[in-house]
Image (cartoon, helix red, strand yellow):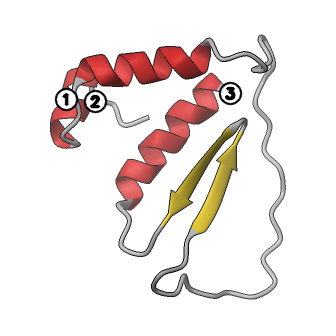
Amino acid sequence: MSGQSVKEWCAAHENVSRQLWDWLRKYKNQDGIARGKTNRWLPVEITEQTSIEQGHTLLVKIGPTSIEVRPGFDPALLAQVVWVLIALC
């Protein structure tokens, strides 16, 4: 995790803490999310290294959630969002 409080994180990412809490609650209480299951890492095999071309996106799926990553994304923000999703899924 980032080590920041919700207030600090929201200020740094121009978000309102109420919106973040609503978003987290929505996904935490979403039907179909298994309760009490532990997270597990799956191996990923990369056969060829390519870059994301302009206009293309990379689709990242975590549980029932999908995130489209476009060129120029903020890696730190993506990492924080992924950590939140992992905790909720």
Q: What residue is rendered at 35% in x and 60% in y?
A: 74
Q: How many marks?
A: 3
Q: Tag 1: Cα neighbours inside 10 Å, few (<14), some, or many (≥20)?
A: few
Q: Earlier in the sequence, mark 3 or mark 2?
A: 2
Position of the N terminus by quadrant: top left
- Residue at disc 2, secondary structure: loop
Q: Position of residue 26 (x, y in %)?
A: 53, 18
- Residue at disc 1, secondary structure: helix
Cβ atoms at labels 2 and 1 below 8 Å apart? yes
Q: Is residue 72 left or right of residue 50?
A: left
Q: Which residue is mark 2?
A: 4
- Residue at disc 3, secondary structure: loop
- Height in image: 51 above or below 27? below
Q: Which residue is mark 1?
A: 8
Where, by quadrant of the figure, is residue 68 drawn? bottom right
Which of the numbered marks, if any, corresponds to residue 89?
3
Q: Is residue 27 left or right of residue 6?
A: right
* Amino acid type for the residue under numbered disc 1: Glu
